[in-house]
């Protein structure tokens, strides 16, 4: 026991030094991150993004609905007084089909559809030119999902709003998109108009995605193309075409040379063999 305590005593200075280094690193990280935030907050890019780019997220917040919806105005329209902000909130809630009686509620008191409408109202209150929707309807049931999609279509028709709609649900993508971009490991593999990409995909990954959609018919034939293997690391992607480890049409140049997107039949496709493949 005496030897144990002697050993501990010998290591105390090292432990204290390590603790000081950790605390100093934490303090510097906090200071640097705040300094960077202050610098960024004063750039014209932030002002442009705040006023012209609306982001609709799926998260919930710990404030009442009125505060949630009004918060972008506090940042990007500080000249408005409380009355003007309240009027803008009422208008935003009306645009998304919510009653003013919901203003005093907390997010946990809302249904899933109501919470999504609040998030959309928050994004629209600064009248952006572009709305980014990341999995906006992923957690909703069918009827509520359709209501949210109809809301987005009406807003787009009324204001000319551009919508970047990010989703893994191909049925939703097909129903709302004018143009569709397919990404794999963060790289564009195909870009085409909404109907064209579903009617005639030109990249093997796009074809595999469409064939993976379940069909409600137990005797219907399966898709023509299924994916094998594992998803590569986005941190250490494969050489050449990033899709080549899982592509059944791979050839030598696919493993070496990164394909550049080129126009083929009205679509932009990043595949060495896109012209010759019949998918």
Image (spheres, rainbow, N blue to C red):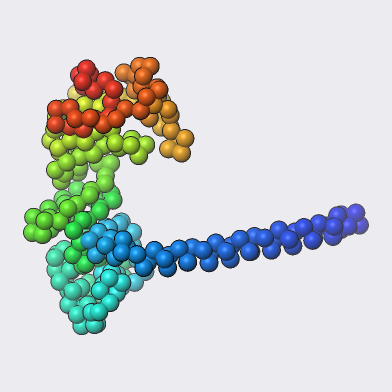
**Front one among 267 and 147:** 267
Q: Is residue 228 left or right of residue 17?
A: left
Residue 71 image-quadrant placement: bottom left
Asked whether residue 222 appears in the rendered view, the answer is no
Residue 200 image-quadrant placement: top left
The image shows residue 16 at horizontal and vertical percentages of: 74, 62
For the C terminus, the quadrant is top left
The image shows residue 47 at horizontal and vertical percentages of: 29, 65
Residue drawn at x 25%, y 79% as measured from the top left: 79
Residue drawn at x 19%, y 30% as measured from the top left: 263
Residue 83 image-quadrant placement: bottom left
The vertical placement of 67 against 246, above or below, is: below
For the N terminus, the quadrant is bottom right
The vertical placement of 153 against 267, above or below, is: below
The image shows residue 40 at horizontal and vertical percentages of: 39, 63
Q: What residue occupies the far right of the structure in this picture?
A: 2
The vertical placement of 1 against 264, above or below, is: below
Asked whether residue 35 appears in the rendered view, the answer is yes
Q: What residue occupies the far left of the structure in this picture?
A: 158
The image shows residue 73 at horizontal and vertical percentages of: 26, 72
**Front one among 207 and 59:** 207
The vertical placement of 6 against 196, above or below, is: below
């Amino acid at each position: 026991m005496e030897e144990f305590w002697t050993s501990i005593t010998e290591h105390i200075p090292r432990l204290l030094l390590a603790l000081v280094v950790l605390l100093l690193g934490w303090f510097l990280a906090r200071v640097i991150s705040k300094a960077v935030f202050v610098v960024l907050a004063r750039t014209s890019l932030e002002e442009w993004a705040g006023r012209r780019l609306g982001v609709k997220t799926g998260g919930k917040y710990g404030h009442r609905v009125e505060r949630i919806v009004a918060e972008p105005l506090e940042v990007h329209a500080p000249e408005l007084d409380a009355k003007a902000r309240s009027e803008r909130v009422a208008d935003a809630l009306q645009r998304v089909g919510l009653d003013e009686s919901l203003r005093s509620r907390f997010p946990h008191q809302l249904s899933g559809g109501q919470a999504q409408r609040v998030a959309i109202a928050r994004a629209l209150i600064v009248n952006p030119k572009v709305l980014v929707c990341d999995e906006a309807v992923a957690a909703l049931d069918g009827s509520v999902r359709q209501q949210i999609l109809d809301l987005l279509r009406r807003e787009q028709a009324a204001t000319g709003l551009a919508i970047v709609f990010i989703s893994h649900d191909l049925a939703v993508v097909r129903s709302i998109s004018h143009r569709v971009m397919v990404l794999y490991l963060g790289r564009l593999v195909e870009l085409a108009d909404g109907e064209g990409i579903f009617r005639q995909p030109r990249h093997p990954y796009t074809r595999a995605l469409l064939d993976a959609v379940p069909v409600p018919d137990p005797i219907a034939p399966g898709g023509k193309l299924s994916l094998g293997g594992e998803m590569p690391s986005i941190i250490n992607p494969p050489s050449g075409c990033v899709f080549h480890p899982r592509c059944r049409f791979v050839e030598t140049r696919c493993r070496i040379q990164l394909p550049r997107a080129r126009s083929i039949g009205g679509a932009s496709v990043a595949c060495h063999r896109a012209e010759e493949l019949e998918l």
